[in-house]
Image (cartoon, helix red, strand yellow):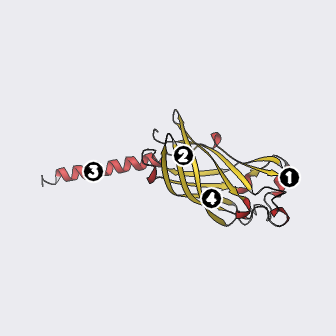
Amino acid sequence: MTHLVPHLRAASLLLLAAASAAAVHAEQKLLPAQSDIAFFSKQMGVAMEGHFKKFDAQIAFDPAKPETGKIALSVDIASATLGAPEMDGELPKATWFNTAKFPQATFQSTSIKGLGGGKFEVSGKLAIKGNTRDAIVPVTLTQSGATTTASGVLTIKRLAFKIGENEWADTSVVADDVQIKFKLALSGVGKL
């Protein structure tokens, strides 16, 4: 029986280590009040800026082992605003975001690659308005105290996601390129 004690002790330590690692990942949370997701486009050559007011993220990420990380982001598309009531009233319609049928846009990571210096490349699936495309998102992490900020810019083609259909498909009126800029404040991420 005494020969089992070292094995039991080792098994207990492994379970404790696994539970501690899971607890670290479980504590990683998005801090919405310090976060922002904006989108930029041009309409008839004039720059337009919008924001999504509601979004959430599930993060399991260790900067020392980025390849083991998982990131899932969901955006409440109906929360989109361009800051003008008449334009905001158009965004939920079927021609644009069709929020009645597609209330959320999502991003689910498939791989994360560390590039050094707090920079990462996150590959995954971006789904907007029922259309899913592969996306590679450049992300820069910075830390201040207990807060880690993930920021970056992703350019998408709106027509690939059927955003702005029919008469709005003319890219001379509304540009096809849309930049999505994000700043996600996170708690519980390990040191860079």
Q: Residue at x 68, y 56 (%)?
A: 156
> Horizontal and vertical percent for residue 65?
42, 48
| Residues tagged 4 and 3 counted as in contact (Cβ below 8 A) | no
Left or right of 19 on screen, residue 167: right
Task: Tell me which label, 2 or 1, sits earlier in the chain.
Answer: 2
Mark 2 residue type: Lys
Q: Is residue 85 above or below residue 166?
A: above
User: Mark 2 — residue?
Assistant: 29
Mark 3 residue type: Ser
Left or right of 26 on screen, residue 150: right
Q: CA distance from mark 1 to mark 3?
A: 65 Å
Of 13 and 126, nearer the camera is 126
Q: Quadrant of residue 77?
A: bottom right
On residue 44, which mark appears?
A: 1
> Horizontal and vertical percent for residue 120?
52, 47
Q: Is residue 59 above or below residue 141?
A: below
Task: Tell me which label, 1 or 3, sits earlier in the chain.
Answer: 3
